[in-house]
Image (cartoon, grey):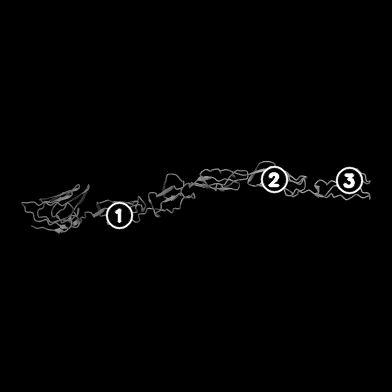
Amino acid sequence: MFWDQRTNMGSEVFYQCNFGYKNVGEGNVSHCNADGQWDKSALLCEAILCGDPPILPHTGQVWNGSTNPGSTVLYYCKEGFYRAGGGNISYCTEYGYWTNVTLSCKEVDCGSPPALPHSVMFWDQRTNMGSEVFYQCNFGYKNVGEGNVSHCMADGAWDQITFLCEEIDCGEPLFIPNTKMIWNRTSLIGSVVYYQCVEGYYNTSGINYTECGENGLWTDIKLQCEEVNCGPPLTLPHANMQWTNRTGLGSVIEYICKQGFYQAGGNSLSTCTPSGQWGIVSIICKGTVKISQNKANYIPLHFWSTALLFHCTSVPSHFCSTAILFHCTSVPLQLYSTALLFHCTSVPLHFCSTALLFHCNSIPLHVCVGDVDLHLLLVPEEGDAVFCIEHIHTFCVMVNHDH
């Protein structure tokens, strides 16, 4: 109220609504009447309300809901937008309206996501907040970090991820006993290592290689190399074996003719080969000279150098030398060196190394060549007979001639 404290007739009092209120009636003055009463004023005070504050694009409000004068509203940019300028506070005035807000909010734009080494990106080309980009390592590489997704953040930047592509390396290949590896020392994806059994061993599985896979592991291989074993050696007639009882690769067996036999030819050594077979041995063992030594017949026997010396004294005797059986009567026999020379009472006999040359005069001889029996016929006194024999076998048949 506004008045001068006078209360006599005609005095006036002025009314004014309090702050936050306004007069919605008629008039605001009351007078002292003649009847000693103040007349009723038409003043009607009503609270001032600004109503709901205005809504701005891409903004949110911080407000307690009051619309009375003096109330305030704080504006902020919504997620995905940033403050580009302007004021962000509005006041409810005593006049019942909100003051203007000049806040400007613009959408966040992260731009193109960063390219990461040895990788490709998968995204929808959106760069506003919340957009995602997926990373994938190139072929031959693998992620050794954590995560592969980056997001566009409210600050306009793509968030940092620990995605890291590293070249796939399978490392050292598997060790397999008794093998050697054939490879170029690379262990990257697609690299191949071949295995080969070392000497003395052979492959029993068939698969002999492994490959570096995309998972960084060498493919499974079940290669097994077993030691070469030639097994029991061949037994040959009339021969003994000298060896260490080893049947592995490189083992050697020597065949030696048994007592009473001699090596007439062929190879006497057999070696265990990488194929698991003993090498071919071709030794030939034949019976040696046997002379019946009957003391009553007075037959002296002498051995000299590599030849045999025989002397027959009026006693029939028999011997086999290179498969020839002779019957001597009152004929001295002599053998020298590796050739044979016979002298039989006025009948010279000559043996020429690998061939035989005979000059005979009514001498019974036993000779066999291959499967053919040679009959030495009577030689006239005035003539000679010559026989040359290239190959001699051990089976002999007696042939007599008494002319």
Query: What residue appears at the point 89 percent right and 45 percent down from the top-left corner?
Result: 12
Which residue is drawn at the image coordinates 41% and 49% (left, top)? 194
Distance between mark 3 and mark 1 Cα atoms: 156 Å
Image x and y of residue 385, in percent: 9, 52
Q: SS for tag 2? A: strand
Label 3 neighbour load within 10 Å: few <14, some 14-19, many 20+: some
Residue picked out by circle 1: 240
Q: Quadrant of residue 159?
A: top right
Q: Nearer the viewer, residue 316 or 134?
A: 134
Residue highlighted by disc 3: 13
Q: Secondary structure at mark 3?
A: strand
Of callouts 3 and 1, the N-terminal one: 3
Nearer to us of marks 2 and 1 is 2
Residue 75: assigned label:
2
**Number of on-image labels:** 3
Quarter holding the N terminus is top right
- Picture coordinates of residue 241, whole percent (x, y): 31, 54
In primary-sequence order, the first of circles 2 and 1 is 2
Q: Could you tell me if the residues under marks 3 and 1 are in contact, i.e. CB atoms within 8 Å?
A: no
Q: State yes or no: discs 2 and 1 in contact (Cβ < 8 Å).
A: no
